[in-house]
Amino acid sequence: MKFLDRFRSRDPKKPEPKPELKSPREIGLMRQSGLLVAEALRLCRSIAKPGVKTVEIDRAVEDLYTSRGAVPLFKGYPGSSKIPFPAVTCLSLNEQVVHGIPGQRVIREGDLLKIDTACKLNGWCADAAITLPIGEVSPAKKRLLAVAEEVLRLAILEMSRRRMWSEVALAMQRAAESAGYSVVTAYVGHGIGRVMHEAPQVPNFVDKEIKKHDFRLEEGLVLAVEPMVNMGKAGTNVLRDQWTVVTRDGLPSVHVEHTLAITAEGVYVVTADEETYVKG
């Protein structure tokens, strides 16, 4: 789950909030939440089949979090809406980009299902998202998914060898656009730690305004990096439920995300299934 004030709405008289760097011990504690988020996403993979209702997936994840004593971070989140988010997962289909509300909609063969979830365990948070092809999807959707996943892999690699975030964001944007796609600019990633949304905001693109709010990549920084790649144009709308974000042109979108920590050993993928460090 991610929200963006688009930088322009910030009060220029107020100083930029500084990221809170985490110690190796704190990153280790975040890993416990990351492992549970990874388990939740594996559970979703096992359930998400043609004929399943999205609410069934959400209930299974909520039961998992409850059984482990974890706090689901999405449920009840106010965001920019007067209506709190009603579920523990965001489940978004096809042209839905992010923040889809689970309900009675049935998953069908050929769908692209985006699953985003986060939890807090023992005081620390983790956040991740995957996009699942349901059954056999079209070659066009397969390619979109492959490119979006490659954009995230590229971001992880670039984080390990770049000095500023804008360098990573530019590489992500170029990778998506060179494949003929667009990067969503209305929503971004975020810092994460004791709370789900911390400084800094983490865009997947670069423009003049973004460069004004660039930040250094340094040891102890933990980010939720989450490219949203559209098959068509970058424009989005929000549905009447005040949450679900859709592509303006109705074409499919893919969303993937990991919580990533910069450490002395490389970029640590906090929400990976297995212990993973990436060093360029």
Image: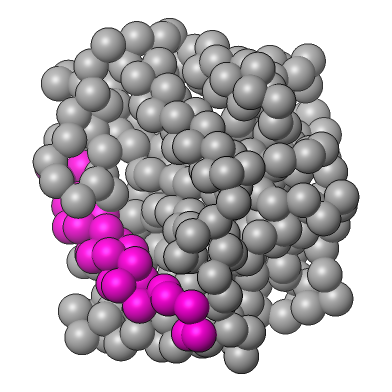
Question: Does residue 102 show up?
Answer: yes
Picture quarter containing residue 21? top left
Please determine whether, in this image, residue 47 is positioned above or below residue 214. below
Foreground of the two, 118 or 78: 118
Is 80 placed left or right of 164 in the picture? right
The span shown in magenta is 25-52
Residue 242 falls in image quadrant: bottom right
Front-most of residues 212 and 206:
206
For image coordinates 50% across by 85% down, the residue present is 51
Front residue of this view, candidates 178 and 220: 178
Image quarter hosting the C terminus: top left
- Image coordinates of residue 80 in percent, x first then y, are 74, 64
Q: Is residue 22 visible?
A: no
Q: Is residue 49 above or below residue 257?
A: below
Count of marks overlaid on the render: 0
Q: What residue is drawn where x is 40% and y is 63%?
A: 118
Image location of residue 17, percent across then percent down: 57, 35
Picture coordinates of residue 124, whole percent (x, y)? 29, 58
Which x, y percent locates residue 233? 82, 38
